Image (spheres, helix red, strand yellow):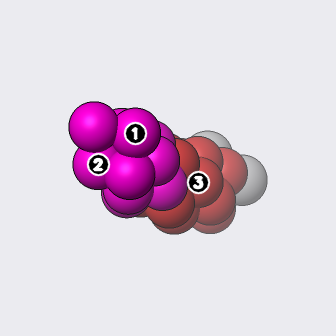
Amino acid sequence: MRISSQLFTRKSVLPSMLVLLIWDILHF
């Protein structure tokens, strides 16, 4: 369970950072 949770958090963190970068580019 712990390993799956870590993988899930990583998978959720990466897209979130990408979205933030794209959001900044769109609203520059």
> Are the residues at dot 1 and dot 2 in contact (C-beta closer than 8 Å)?
yes
Residue at horizontal 38 percent and vertical 51 percent from the top: 3
> Horizontally, is 28 left or right of 22 in the view?
right
Span highlighted in magenta in the image: 1-11
x and y percent of residue 27 in the render? 61, 46
Q: Amino acid at mark 3?
A: Met
Q: CA distance from mark 1 to mark 3?
A: 23 Å
Residue at horizontal 28 percent and vertical 37 percent from the top: 1
Q: Which mark is residue 4?
A: 2
Q: CA distance from mark 3 to mark 2?
A: 20 Å
Residue at horizontal 29 percent and vertical 48 percent from the top: 4
The answer to whether residue 19 is seen in the rendering is no
The crowd level at tag 2 (other Cα within 10 Å; few <14, some 14-19, many 20+) is few
List the residue tagged with mark 3: 17
Q: Which mark is residue 2?
A: 1
**Towards the viewer: 20 or 26:** 20
Residue at horizontal 45 percent and vertical 47 percent from the top: 6
